[in-house]
Image: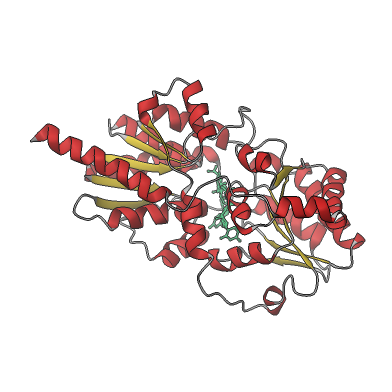
Amino acid sequence: MKVLVVVGTRPEAIKMAPLVAALEARRDIFDTRLCVSGQHRDMMDSVIHLFGLTVHYDLNVMVHNQSVADITTKVLTGVSGVLEAESPDVVLIHGDTTTSFAAALAAHYHRAPVGHVEAGLRTHDKWHPFPEEMNRRLADALCDYHYAPTERARENLLAENIPPEQIVVTGNTAIDALLWAAKQPCSFDDPFLERAGADRRLILVTAHRRESFGAPFREMCSAMRDVVNHNDNVEVIYPMHPNPNVRKAACEILRGHERIRLVEPLGYLPFVQLQKKAYLILTDSGGIQEEAPSLGTPVLVMRDTTERPEAVDAGVSKLVGTKRADIAREVQQLLDKEADYNQMASAVNPFGDGHASERIAGHLADLAQNQRGIHA
Ligand code: UD1
Ligand code: UDP
């Protein structure tokens, strides 16, 4: 079975790496090709390098401050060329990025079957997150195999009339990657990062969502500054996304404070270590909502909706919106109220057991055997 895996951004590469490894471990069944769109460049390349992945096609689409329409058209055309060259038996995409949606569309135009890893996540609000909610809905509509990370994701797909036989509940491959990463040795060049969490309570921050550009970002950054100003025993580390719309507000509002460290995006291993060291995480990231529960670190999500309600239900994450006063109040509560904090820190990871990739590879292997049976 020839499998074409398409990834474009940092989180896709992290979450597809264990699956690529699982497919490559079964070379008797799978001939695996990896196409990177290059929607992200430096942030994704470091992950490709970390996991030792072999890239067969690189579309190199990224430009500074790119538009979603631009990514879509370039990936659609680029992946179409790869499909023509390779004629894969199945294409695998991940999650909700524009690379994933455009690759699924390209595969559909080429009548190639598509498997969606991390299928079925929904906020049910088409503008939040933007454009991810529509990317994943459109991708699911185009796909033939749906690898749902949780039972809730399966229910979302069934509610959209996806046939039950096309859905496999696998757990999230994020946990496969995380369990490996958490065991790897890792050191920091920057002494501030090395000592993080040792003398003060560390708040780890990330933010990059398009729907929050502008005023909401300023609110989030102002909330962080308020919290640090009110609490001498708190420090912030904020690896800033390279998107220029994010950096402007972050630098203007947060730069220059002795207990706030604005840094470049971190490698996956150091970032996982910081998630472990953190007292709490403030983020709008999707993937971090999945990882932090496994590391026992509470997450405050700076958004009004989430496609990962499992973490909220498990008690490990909480939606705090994008308003300065709301964010500052919720952080303060976790700093002051030990019982509330302990409850969040002891919740259990609802996203998987670290064997999601094996399940997906197993499903594809069954398909390959059936194909062989049909052609025999
Ligand atoms: C993208 C995805 C988002 C995902 C996120 C993960 C879309 C529309 N957005 O958002 O769903 O959650 O990745 O991080 O698919 N840049 C660099 N170097 C990099 C990466 C980005 O300089 O390695 C800068 C470039 O100026 C680029 C900009 O960031 O144009 C935005 O990148 P883009 O992929 O469009 O958006 P993200 O916010 O990263
Ligand atoms: N991550 C990383 N370095 C960082 C910040 C995040 O390696 O400086 C990892 C994080 O551990 C998670 C993924 O990137 O696996 C999340 O990516 P991001 O928040 O950019 O995207 P999302 O998950 O929101 O799509």
Colour setting: secondary structure
Check the image and name the residue furthest to the right: 230
Q: As rendered, which of 204 and 238 lies closer to the eye?
A: 204
> In x, y percent, where is residue 96?
51, 39
Taking 254 as reference, is 12 above or below it? above
In the image, taking residue 33 as reference, residue 262 lies left or right, namely right
> In x, y percent, where is residue 262?
72, 65
> In x, y percent, where is residue 102?
42, 37
Q: Quadrant of ligand 2?
A: bottom right
Q: Quadrant of residue 225?
A: bottom right
Taking 146 as reference, is 232 above or below it? below
Quadrant housing the N terminus: top left
> In x, y percent, where is residue 248?
73, 55
The number of numbered discs placed on residues in the rendered structure image is 0
Give the residue at x 52% y 60%.
43
Give the residue at x 33% y 55%.
22
Q: Quadrant of residue 376?
A: top left
* Residue 290 appearing in the image: yes
Q: As rendered, which of 314 and 290 lies closer to the eye?
A: 314
Taking 254 as reference, is 312 above or below it? above
In the image, taking residue 339 as reference, residue 299 lies left or right, namely left
Q: As rendered, which of 269 and 103 lies closer to the eye?
A: 269
Give the residue at x 69% y 54%.
346
* Residue 222 appearing in the image: no
Give the residue at x 65% y 43%.
314
Q: As rendered, which of 240 and 183 lies closer to the eye?
A: 183
Taking 268 as reference, is 81 above or below it? above
